[in-house]
Amino acid sequence: MESFISTLADQLFSAIGGRKEGLTPVLPSFKYKYEPFDVEKWTSAIEKLESNDAYDRFEVCYLSPDRLLTLKLTYTVYANFPVIEWRPELSAPAGADTGLIENFRSFALDWDLWADPDNRWEPYSLGIRRYLGAKTLMDDFRPMPIRLENRYPLNNLVLDTDEGRSSTAWLPFVGVDLDDFYGFNVAVGWSGAWSMNFQLQGNPSKGFRLHADAGMLKTHFRLKAGETIRQPSIFVMLRDNMSVEDAQNLHRRFMLDFHAPHGKDGKPLQAPLCYCVWGGETNADVIRKLDWVQKAHLHFDALWMDAGWYGSDREVASDEFHGSDWSRTVGNWRVNQVPHPGGLSPIAVRAHEAGMKYMLWVEMERAMPDSPIVQEHPNWFLAANGSDRLMLNLGIPAARAWAVETISRLVREEKIDFYREDFNFNILPICEQADKEDRQGITEAKFITGFYEFWDELRTRFPDMMIDNCASGGRRIDFETASRSICMFRSDIIGRSFLDSSEAQQNELCWLGQWVPHQAGNISVQSNDDYQFLSAAAPGIAISCAYDLAKLDADWLQNMLYIAERMRPLAYGNLHILAGGDDIDAPWLVYQMDNPETDEGYIAAFRRPDASEATCAIAPRGIEPRAKYILEPTNGKPTEIKGSELAKLTVKLPKPRSAVVFFYTRANARKNS
């Protein structure tokens, strides 16, 4: 089979370094002044921006025939990954508006497949691996694979969104599989509303073509004089003679290297182990809890304070579920001095004394009409008709600067280490209402660009400050947010005090983890419930503010945190789903995290409540049959085992709803990480 890597690479270089006969470049598609974009009619220039051991970066500019529209494409070609990435920008000159730009698609690929005259009556198909987004449901991030076939209506697939957040309907990561070993992944880097289309064209005798495109949900606009807007980023990863599982682990490594937040030391930030408290709890109550955590020798990385700490000075509810006004006071980001005399810094100081970072919840982009900032700058805010949920328009430079300074002040004055940003908005109706007929898409494009600039400035000022990307739990996940943040609440279904969502935790870790290795879940922890705790223990974890830890078995919790701490660094290795897979109701779920560089990893096995069988046979990956391994289960003692035995392991759990984690290390393993 023809090498897909070389073909797509040829197409890219055709786009940035001259044409090659018979190839269609991987370029955006759109209409300008009602005419399709045609590189033959536009003036182009190319510049090499950067070259190092990791990647080459190019900038290609196309100037329209009327010289009023510039399309700038910044391409990155990675050296150690079969990945091509690009970011489009559109701009108008200082002295004139552009013509009408319609249906801008950042990614537009027409891929010639093959003809097979001998099988002209047989259906031809190719697989699309798509995954649901987050809707606060038990099947969040569930795989929904589908096959395109060469007959209508099975030859078309549209993925879009019903909200203006990137991962509500579908994850913006999709796999295209021509067969078991060839295909590609495509990812959309856009934290607003996007769509992706696939169409299988042609017939067996003449050959097939795959058309694929992706971009903003709706674009129909003119640029004003001197205006520049950004469009969704794209990356494509080729799968050439590689299994889907191997390709997804290559994708995980790429994400960790290039689309994960790194500290000022250049190393990726890790998802922390967090203890959560409610923002309405008093300083004295929170400090009492911290005293107990330290006395019980519990190792948490961070104290996480959730909503409810802000607004005018008043008595407030001490938890989320009994009369809290947290959602009615957003936008007034001053500390409520009644529960927090002297501010939040006394809590931060005590957390630091206990060896913990301090993380604070803010919903920077939302405000209520009576907020002081809304009264002072009403033009900074947008809303849909009839709604009192106002959105701070980060596309306005002054509004964005205020957001940066507000968070910076909190970080400095209240001694905040980590910043948790929530975003409980569907921006679609807001942006649609703000746009005129010939400016559709402009408000969203500027808002999303301003959002990236907001986070980028915070990361520049505070390079070791982790940003937690919440957005109603996992609804704003894409490779642009993943580059700047860690999603510590991958779904709001997790951690409700009235719901045991352990199985959802297990599934989400495996399903979302194939695309986004940086993530974590939340639990409302119960004493001696290993099953619940281990379901959410990697890579990070947040223990719900619905519980006072002092009521738990401290020795048990100490052991669970020790296990979670051991799991965490290994959870960034290769992910292998050994049992359960795509089946949401599978009786067993078993996954493996393997680090081939250090010859170690762990296997987490869950016998679910309805599982009738007490055993599950698995085949762990990456095991050398002739080597020896130290196998250490959380419910037993370490033993030495042959690799041939470990590669064909039978897990036994006598009771339903139980779990075990096996840590394994190859004898005389390489410890080079």
Image: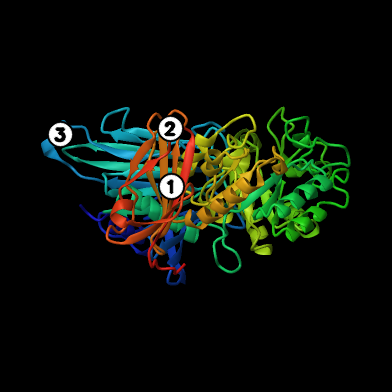
Disc 3 residue type (three-letter): Arg
Q: Is residue 613 above or below residue 223?
A: above
Who is closer to the viewer here, 654 or 121?
654
| Real-space Cα separation, disc 3 to disc 2, in angstroms | 37 Å
Q: Earlier in the sequence, mark 3 or mark 1?
A: 3
Residue 42 visible to the viewer: no
Q: Secondary structure at mark 2?
A: loop
Tag shown at residue 350? none
Residue 581 lies left or right of residue 475; in this view the side is left
Q: Is residue 325 above or below residue 468?
A: above
In contact (CB < 8 Å): disc 3 and disc 1: no
Residue 22 lies left or right of residue 350; in this view the side is left
Who is closer to the viewer here, 43 or 273?
273
- Where's residue 545, x and y in %? 70, 41
Q: Nearer the viewer, mark 3 or mark 2?
A: 2
Who is closer to the viewer here, 595 or 133?
595
Who is closer to the viewer here, 489 or 276?
276
Category of crowding for the residue at label 1, using alpha-carbon neighbours closer than 10 angstroms: few (below 14), some (14–19), many (at least 20): many
Q: Secondary structure at mark 1?
A: loop
Category of crowding for the residue at label 2, using alpha-carbon neighbours closer than 10 angstroms: few (below 14), some (14–19), many (at least 20): some
Q: Image point 48% across, 61% down: which residue?
A: 257
| Real-space Cα separation, disc 3 to disc 1, in angstroms | 36 Å
Q: Earlier in the sequence, mark 1 or mark 2?
A: 1
Q: Nearer the viewer, mark 3 or mark 1?
A: 1
Label 1, on which residue?
Answer: 514
Q: Is residue 197 above or below residue 562?
A: above
Q: Secondary structure at mark 3?
A: loop
Label 2, on which residue?
Answer: 584
Label 3, on which residue?
Answer: 120
- Where's residue 248, x and y in %? 38, 50
Residue 526 visible to the viewer: yes
| Real-space Cα separation, disc 1 to disc 2, in angstroms | 16 Å
